[in-house]
Image (spheres, rainbow, N blue to C red):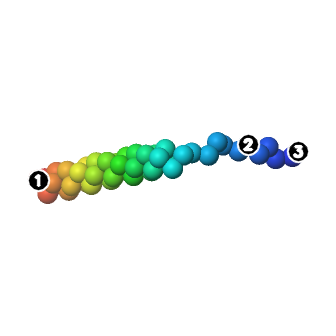
Amino acid sequence: MPALHIERPSLSREMHDALKRHVLRERQKKKEEADANEADKQRRRAEK
């Protein structure tokens, strides 16, 4: 069976930059939340 190749439309430079900023901001937000959760876990362990 032949592979189906679908090209996605190319993004304008502005849209590409906006998408990149959005993705990087979301990654940073997730990282900060994970770090805060880890710090909270460690604090709870220390209180026991």
In terms of image quadrants, where is residue 1?
top right
Structural crowding at the residue carrying mark 2, measured as other residues with C-alpha within 10 Å and reported as few (<14), some (14–19) or many (≥20)? few
Can residue 34 be seen at all in this image of the molecule?
Answer: no
For marks 2 and 3, give the CA distance.
15 Å
Helix, strand or loop at label 1? It is helix
- In the rendering, which numbered label is found on residue 6? 2
Residue closer to the observer: 5 or 46: 5
Precedes in sequence: disc 2 or disc 1: 2
- In the image, is 38 to the left or to the right of 14? left
- Tell me the amino acid under the disc marked 3: Met
- For label 3, the residue is 1
- Tell me the amino acid under the disc marked 2: Ile
Which residue sits furthest right?
Answer: 1
What's the residue at 28%, 52% (across, down)? 32
- In the image, is 5 to the left or to the right of 41? right
- For label 1, the residue is 47
For marks 2 and 1, give the CA distance.
56 Å
Helix, strand or loop at label 3? It is loop
Can residue 37 be seen at all in this image of the molecule?
Answer: yes
Q: Are marks 2 and 3 in contact (CB under 8 Å)?
A: no
